[in-house]
Image (cartoon, rainbow, N blue to C red):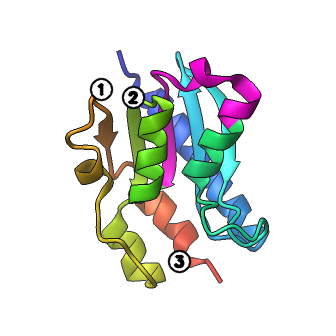
Amino acid sequence: MKNPDDDSLHMRAAIAASREARERGDMPFGAVLVKDGRALLTALNNQNSARDCTGHAETVLVREAQRALGEAALRGATVYASGEPCAMCAGAMFWAGISRVVYAASSPAMDAILGGATLGARCASVLANASPAVSVEGPFLEEEAVQVLKTAP
């Protein structure tokens, strides 16, 4: 059974990671991998610092977790993301075996603040017909995540 207090704790860790990413000059996004109620790994967007256009926090998280923890750690886990994952990140999480995604800032909220390019595909839509199913929940604690986006350079 999901504990809303745990959801808040893990989401706030993802939002803190987004703040850290922003402070180091990357896009303000963070993600946390959680399994069996335990945070296993936190990742930050690294598009600028790694000079990698695929360096979204969720994709970085999947790569780092698979390398450091192995495939089994990802299967059935939850990812908490400070922003709604894009189609690329949704696909990466699906292929990694993530079973639940919880995001803070919605794509429309992020687009309104940051503008820029968008695929226009919402995370839940990308994963709607996934088999095995992936639960997508959000926005959750959106205003807290939006505050970090509003202070982005």
User: Which of the marked residues, 3 or 1, is nearer the chain's N terminus?
Assistant: 1
Image point (46%, 28%), residue name:
97
Q: Which mark is residue 99?
A: 2
Could you tell me residue 102's position as x and y percent? 40, 42
Check if mark 2's residue and mark 1's residue have beta carbons within 8 Å. Answer: yes
Measure the C-alpha gap from mark 3 to mark 1.
36 Å
Residue 81 painted magenta: yes
Residue at horizontal 73 percent and vertical 60 percent from the top: 20
Q: Residue at x 60, y 77 (%)?
A: 151
Amino acid found under the numbered disc labelled 3 = Lys
Q: Relative to 82, is 133 above or below?
A: above
Instruction: For the N terminus, give its image quadrant.
Output: top left
> Considering only order in the chain, which callout, 2 or 3, is on the residue closer to the N terminus?
2
Residue 40 rendering spot, x and y as whole percentages: 66, 27
The stretch drawn in magenta includes residue 97: no
**Mark 2 residue type:** Ser
Q: Nearer the viewer, mark 2 or mark 1?
A: 1
- The alpha-carbon separation of the residues under discs 2 and 1 comes to 8 Å
Which quarter of the figure has residue 69?
top right
Indicate which disc residue 150 carries: 3
Q: Position of residue 49 (x, y in %)?
A: 79, 68
Q: Residue at x 45, y 36 (%)?
A: 95
Comparing marks 3 and 2, which lies closer to the viewer? 2
Circle 3 residues within 10 Å: few <14, some 14–19, many ≥20: few
**Residue 57 shown left or right of residue 117 in the figure:** right
Does 138 sit left or right of 104 as displayed?
left
At label 1, which amino acid type do we have? Answer: Pro
Q: Which residues are magenta?
A: 65-82
Q: Is residue 84 visible?
A: no
Q: Secondary structure at mark 1?
A: loop
Residue receiving disc 1: 132
